[in-house]
């Protein structure tokens, strides 16, 4: 099986590249300067020449706040390019693995009461920010393209590469005595290594459709930060605050738990607790 990874310079793209290399698999990986997914000609040429069996799309416009102003660019990358990619995959007979987000859901407090175990895959999304809307449009385009696909929604993505909350807290925890952290947004982190491994399980079993891949448990960013400091033995005074004290351009869902019942029934899938996933990531970062 031959893989082609797009967005290979991002945190998930780099995790995929590491994995495929370690397993000695046949793959090519393109970062944004080698393959711009919004460039139809380039996309057609590269996929036409490489002839991958599986395209792993890790390319995305992920700047949630900037997307509120850069709407066109966010839409071009997260929706227009994804539609083109799906059509090319259909034409060439390649499987498309695409990553989406918990931010396709509105995440209201009412939903939190109604859906204590989180949003299921078939729940209709109703995004509250531009990033979430463009990611939802991307999902819709893939579903209508007729290609063979896996859409994998992840949340609060953290891995050893790139920028993420865990790495930011590790840095700030060493620099500051006191940190204020948001304590009214509920969800759970998806750890890149686990996302890649579970995606492989789904591919090996020729699954298709939409799947949620995240850790078990329901926490806030505050809970996550406290555990990071606890695991690292950092004595930081942590103050819980509400999102209103950290105004951002884009609204964030107050509840964005992805329900994982669907993948839990599949042989070989590993759903880690958030503490287990965090511990593993911190060990990887310490190496
Ligand atoms: N990070 C999260 O918390 C989170 C949460 C839920 C879902 N997700 C989803 O998970 C996936 C992976 O996210 P991530 O955290 O790995 O994102 P990331 O670190 O921001 O990586 C995204 C990559 O896409 C590349 N890219 C942007 N525009 C491109 C284009 N036109 N052509 C080709 N490549 C392009 C970027 O390259 P440059 O840096 O060179 O622009 C970057 O390397 C995305 O689909 C994202 O929506 C992420």
Image (cartoon, rainbow, N blue to C red):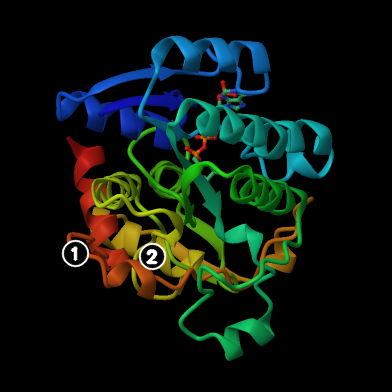
**To which residue does mark 1 refer?**
267
Which residue sits at x=28%, y=62%?
230
Relative to 152, is 57 above or below?
above
- Local packing at callout 2 (Cα closer than 10 Å; few below 14, some 14-19, many 20+) is some
Q: Residue 115 carries which label?
A: none
Residue 82 falls left or right of residue 209: right
Q: In which quarter of the image is the C terminus?
A: top left
Residue 201 place in picture, x, y as percent: 24, 51
- For the residue labelled by badge 2, is the local secondary structure a helix, a strand or a loop? helix
Is tag 1's residue or tag 2's residue first in the polypeptide sequence? 2
Q: Quadrant of residue 76 in the image?
A: top right
Please provide percent x and percent y for residue 120.
51, 73
- Identify the residue at image location x=31%, y=55%: 234
SS at badge 1: loop
In front of the other: 103 or 36: 36
Residue depicted at 15% across the width and 24% down the height = 24
The residue at which mark 2 appears reads as: 226
In terms of depth relative to the viewer, which is nearer, 272 or 270? 270
Position in image of residue 184 (x %, y %): 60, 74
Task: Name the quarter showing ligand 1.
Answer: top right
Q: Residue 160: x, y in percent?
A: 33, 38
Closer to the observer: label 1 or label 2?
1
Q: Is residue 190 above or below residue 33?
A: below
Q: Which of 167 and 211 is in front in this view?
A: 211
User: Mark 1 near mark 2, Cβ–Cβ under 8 Å?
Assistant: no
Residue 29 vertical position relative to residue 134 in the rendered view, above or below? above
- Which quadrant of the figure has residue 19? top left
**Residue at horizontal 60 percent and vertical 51 percent from the top:** 143
Would residue 41 be seen by someone viewing this image from the given angle? yes
């Amino acid at each position: 099986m031959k893989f082609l990874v797009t967005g290979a310079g991002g945190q998930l793209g780099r995790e995929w590249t590491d994995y495929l290399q370690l397993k000695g698999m046949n793959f090519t990986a393109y970062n944004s300067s080698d393959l711009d997914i919004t460039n139809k000609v380039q996309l057609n040429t590269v996929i036409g020449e490489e002839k991958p069996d599986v395209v792993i799309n890790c390319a995305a416009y992920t700047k949630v706040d900037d997307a509120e102003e850069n709407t066109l660019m966010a839409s071009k990358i997260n929706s227009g390019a994804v539609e083109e990619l799906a059509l090319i995959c259909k034409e060439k007979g390649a499987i498309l693995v695409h990553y989406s987000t918990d931010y396709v859901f509105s995440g209201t407090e009412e939903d939190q009461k109604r859906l204590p175990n989180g949003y299921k895959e078939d729940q209709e999304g109703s995004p509250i920010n531009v990033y979430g809307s463009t990611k939802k449009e991307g999902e819709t385009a893939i579903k209508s393209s007729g290609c063979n696909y896996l859409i994998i929604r992840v949340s609060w993505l953290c891995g050893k590469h790139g920028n993420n909350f865990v790495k930011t807290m590790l840095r700030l925890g060493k620099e500051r005595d006191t940190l204020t952290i948001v304590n009214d947004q509920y969800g759970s982190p998806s750890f890149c290594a686990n996302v890649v491994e579970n995606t492989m399980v789904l591919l090996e079993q020729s699954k298709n459709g939409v799947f949620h891949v995240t850790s078990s448990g329901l926490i806030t960013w505050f809970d996550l930060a406290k555990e990071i400091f606890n695991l690292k033995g950092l004595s930081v005074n942590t103050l819980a605050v509400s999102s209103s004290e950290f105004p951002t351009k884009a609204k964030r869902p107050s509840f964005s738990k992805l329900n994982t019942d669907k993948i839990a029934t599949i042989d070989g899938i590993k759903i880690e607790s958030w503490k287990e996933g965090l511990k593993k990531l911190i060990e990887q970062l310490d190496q």
